[in-house]
Image (cartoon, grey):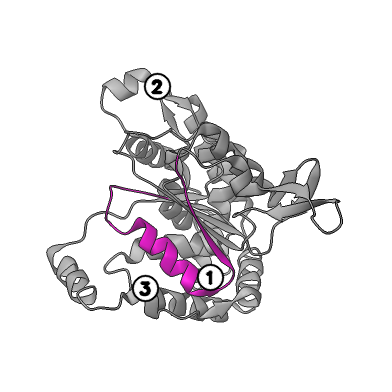
Amino acid sequence: MQQNQVRSLVYSLQRNIRQVIVGKDEAIELALIALLCKGHVLIEDVPGVGKTTLAAALARSLACSFKRIQFTPDVMPSDITGFTMPSLQTGEMEFKPGAVMSQIVLADEINRTSPKTQSSLLEVMEEGQVTVDGVTHPLPRPFMVLATQNPVDFVGTYPLPEAQMDRFFLRIAIGYPSIEEEMDVLERYSGQVSPLQTLSPVCGTADILAMQEAVGQVYCSREVRSYVAQIAAHTRNHPSLLLGVSPRGAIALIRAAQACAVLAGRDYILPDDVKRMALPVLSHRLILSPEARMKGHSPQQILLSLLSSVPVPVKLP
C-alpha cells in the first residue's frame, strides 16, 4: 500500500471516530498510530471522560472481530485465555476459546481484576498467542488490546505490574473537554440514539495489515537510531528514576516515529517525530525514585528534561 493511501484511510478513520469523540484529535491520532504499529493502548484518565467510548469507537470503525472484557475481581484467567474440557460427543479434550480470541479486545477497567488475571494477558500482548494446557493457539491478525483504567480510583483496584505496563505501546490521557466541546457533547448525546451506535466500519482486515506493512518500510537513519538509544540510556542512568526505558520501549519509539512520519507525508524519520512520540510511548514505562515522588516530580517532567539535554542529530536522511 502506498503512503498516500495509508494517510487517506487514517483520515477516514479519524473522521469516523470524531462523530463520537469531540475535540480529542490528539488522543484519536495516538490510538490510530498504535494500530498502525501493531501496538496496544492504555487509556488512562479520570472516570467519565470517554475512555471506553474512544476504544469502542475505534473498534466499530474497523471491520474486525471485537470482544469486550469487563474486568472485575471475580474474573478468572481462563475467562480471558480459554480452557479445555471433555467434548460431550467424542469424550476428547476440546479447547473453548476465551474472550481474548478476537482481533480487537477492549479490556475495560483492567486494574480492577486480580494480578493473576492481569498476568494472563502477558503472553497475549507480547507474542500474539495463548497457551492453554501446554497447547499454543495463535490469535487472529491484526490483534490489538485497548485497555482502560482510572488512575485516581484506587478503591478495589490492583496496580498494573511493570511487565504489564511495558507491553503497552503507548498511553493516552483523554482530559476534560472545553466548555464549547462539552456543549457539543451534550447536543450529540441528547437524542434517543447514541452516536456510537450509528458508526459503520471504514476499513477491514486486509487494509489494516497493508497499512502496518507500509509503516514498517519507513527509513530510519543510523543517526536517529543513535538518538533513540541515547534517550533510553539517559533514563536508565537518571538519579530520579528507579526504572528506565527498556529495549522494548526504544523499539516502540522507533515504530511510533515511523507512523508519525507516514502521517506527515514522509518515508523517513526526523528527530522531531521521535520527540513528538516520546511522552506517550515512554512515560508510562518509567518508575520514579521515592525521593522524586516526595518532591512531586512526574515521569513526564523528567522525560522532557532529558529530551532537552540529549543532543539532536543534525544530519538528515
| Residue 226 placement (x, y as % from top left) | 59, 44
Residue that label 2 marks? 289
Q: Residue at x 33, y 18 (%)?
A: 291
- Disc 1 secondary structure class: loop
Camera sees residue 164: yes
Q: What distance separates the C-alpha of mark 1 from that of mark 2?
A: 39 Å
Q: What distance separates the C-alpha of mark 3 from that of mark 1?
A: 33 Å
Kind of residue at disc 3: Leu
- Disc 3 secondary structure class: helix
Farthest residue to the top: give it: 291
105 or 269: nearer the viewer: 105
Residue that label 3 marks? 196
Magenta residue span:
43-72
Lateral position of residue 119 relative to residue 197, left or right: right
58 or 101: nearer the viewer: 101
Q: Which residue is drawn at 52% across and 42% down?
A: 75
Circle 1 or circle 2, nearest the eye: 2
152 or 90: nearer the viewer: 90
- Disc 2 secondary structure class: loop
| Residue 38 placement (x, y as % from top left) | 60, 59
Circle 2 or circle 3, nearest the eye: 3
Q: Residue 26 carries which label?
A: none
Badge 1: few (under 14), some or many (20 or more) residues near its Cα, within 10 Å?
some
Residue that label 1 marks? 266
36 or 265: nearer the viewer: 36
- Quarter of the image for the N terminus: give it: bottom right
- Quarter of the image for the C terminus: give it: bottom right
Kind of residue at disc 1: Arg
Badge 2: few (under 14), some or many (20 or more) residues near its Cα, within 10 Å?
some
